[in-house]
Image (cartoon, rainbow, N blue to C red):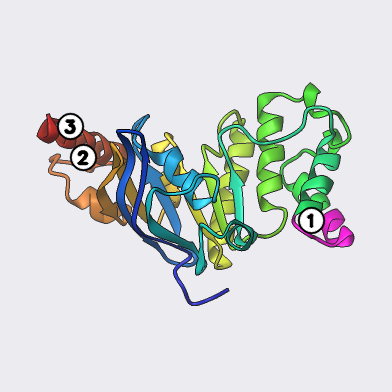
Amino acid sequence: MTNNPAISTDQLTKEYGETTAVADLDLEVATGTVYGFLGPNGAGKTTTIRMLTSLTRPTSGTGRIVGEPITERETAIRHVGYLPESPPIYDELTAREQLEYHGGLRDMDAADIEQRTGELLDRFDLADDADSRISTYSKGMRQKTGLIQALLHDPDVLILDEPTSGLDPRAARTVRETITELAADDATVFLSTHILPVVEELATEVGILYEGQMVAEGPPETLKDRMETGGESTLEDVFFEVTTETARTEG
């Protein structure tokens, strides 16, 4: 692990023709941080994540993952575990085969793949089904497979898009516990979800994106203290007020 911020961007921008999906985004996410990345549908969250994971090249601006430029895909993604909303897994494989294949792509040693696979299958209660084809899996089981795949190579930075989608309460709790443990071990988690209580519980820093621009950022408690509700506010209150006020101002 380096002393650089785990994730940093400077004026990161992505345009599609005349449409600006992300505009002049500045991020600095410290090592060991759980960063909650929020915004309504169409705000630019997925585009940002795709740029951070080197799947989409920015139109302008720069970004780094653990000091590596995001435009240098092979070096940057060594540090990243990524769970998109629809995990990239092959239906014709078993979960164990999928994980062995993914570990090979990550240049992991066969013994390390076997050990990590066993540990994570047990942790996410998937060991009994690890040798069944993924085509037979429920949505929750597929999500678990995608999570294990993202965690397999013990990444420095874990980027999660709706990680608890389709999971039962027990599995969702395991995800939350895993995120907390990773941050305690100096890994960094970049968490995008619409389940705001999860962010409120886990995040040490929150950024709210609206129409491609960062409209609020800070620790959850600091953001909540800005609210004047006359009572205890929640992150959901902050999200609603910030996005509503931004829309009203721009309108």
Q: Residues within 10 Å of mark 2 (few under 14, many from 20)?
A: some
Q: Name the residue type under label 3.
A: Ala
Instruction: Please say if 110 is above or below 84.
Output: below
**Mark sitting earlier along the chain (2/3):** 2
Between disc 2 and disc 3, the foreground one is 3
The residue that appears at 61% across and 61% down in the rendered structure is 79
Determine which residue is flagged by label 3: 247
Q: Main secondary structure of the magenta part?
A: helix
Q: Which residue is disc 2 drawn over?
A: 242
Please state the extent of the stretch shown in magenta in the rendering: 106-116
Q: Position of residue 66 (x, y in %)?
A: 52, 67
Q: Quadrant of the C terminus?
A: top left
Tell me: residue 128, above or below residue 223.
above
Q: Quadrant of residue 129?
A: top right
| Residue plotted at (80% across, 40% down) | 98
Q: CA distance from mark 2 to mark 1?
A: 42 Å
Rendered view: 15 above or below 68: above
